[in-house]
Amino acid sequence: MSETFNEPKNSVVSKRRLATIREPVGEAAKLSDLSEKLLEDVDQTILESLLQHCRICYLEPAQYLHLVRKHRRFIYVLRKGYVTVSLKTKENEPAKFLAWRKPGQLLGEMEALYPDTDTISARLKATDKCELLEIPSKILINIADNTPAIYRNVCSLLIEKNFEHRRRADVLKLRTPLDRVRATLIHLRRERGYELDNKTIKGNIRPQDIAGFIGEDPDRVTPKLDMLVEEGSIEYINSDEMREFKGKRIEGKKIKIRNEKLLSEK
């Protein structure tokens, strides 16, 4: 089940929204925070060699990043923030919404390892401030040929991603939009490991998180959330932050689940 959405028509705006900020990873000795599952159990010497070719890429809200640029292919690890992934297979058609990606997940691995000649454009779009580790696919593949741990890690991450697709498919099978919003809220709460304390979930779930997960326009999700506020199962926590999703500015509201039992029983 896919959604389509039109890209910005103004070429100046489009160029401005392209990601341009990249910087070298730096010395591997200072990268204790780069504990991505993709690089687990990789020898330190090999890791240092690989990271010399990598970059840290930063995206602002609504900026996007092409997975294939000038015939070079990259694999990304999303370190911070959330992105949507869209594919385009025909020049005269809009991009199709494919998936919602969260921190820790791989991006672009299939395009890099098994290029799809039918795909004209595959790209990421940030819903908030994002940070990604950018790895040239050819270099990673060359190293992986002598480092089985990398292939094992890729397989593990792909399995996790498959489970995510299955959970999303189960949500999309629900009959009404309100039921899908309810199920998404419960899924995100459990996925992020929020602690239950006096029927209040400690954590941040934002309207655009829900919209991104089910591939829906935020303007159509907000009225459903308002209904859940009225019934007492959730509440809004106001924030001064402003976000952008699919070209729309969104208030920096965060959602707190007050009563999961009420939320799930409806």
Image (cartoon, helix red, strand yellow):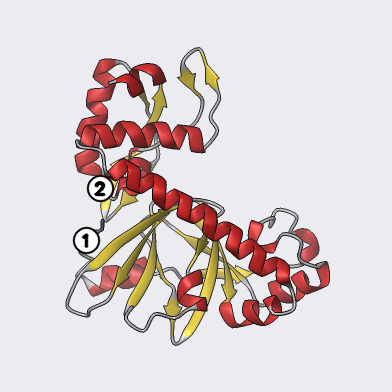
Q: Quadrant of the N terminus?
A: bottom left
How would you rate the neighbour count of disc 2 (Cα within 10 Å): few for under 14, some for 14-19, many for 20 or more? some
Viewer-side residue, 62 vs 171: 171
Farthest residue, direction bottom? 71
Residue at position x 81%, y 67% in the image = 44
Q: Secondary structure at mark 1?
A: strand
Q: Is residue 76 above or below residue 70?
A: above
Q: Is residue 71 above or below residue 50?
A: below
Could you say which disc has been placed on residue 216 in the image?
Answer: 2
Residue that label 1 marks: 4
Q: Is residue 145 above or below residue 109?
A: below
Q: Is residue 120 above or below residue 42?
A: below
Question: Residue 47 in the image: x percent, y percent?
Answer: 75, 69
Residue at position x 66%, y 64% in the image = 152
Q: Are marks 2 and 1 in contact (CB under 8 Å)?
A: no
Which amino acid is tagged 2?
Glu
Q: Secondary structure at mark 2?
A: loop
Which amino acid is tagged 1?
Thr
How would you rate the neighbour count of disc 1 (Cα within 10 Å): few for under 14, some for 14-19, many for 20 or more? some
Residue at position x 69%, y 55% in the image = 35
Q: Is residue 258 visible in this depiction of the protein?
A: no
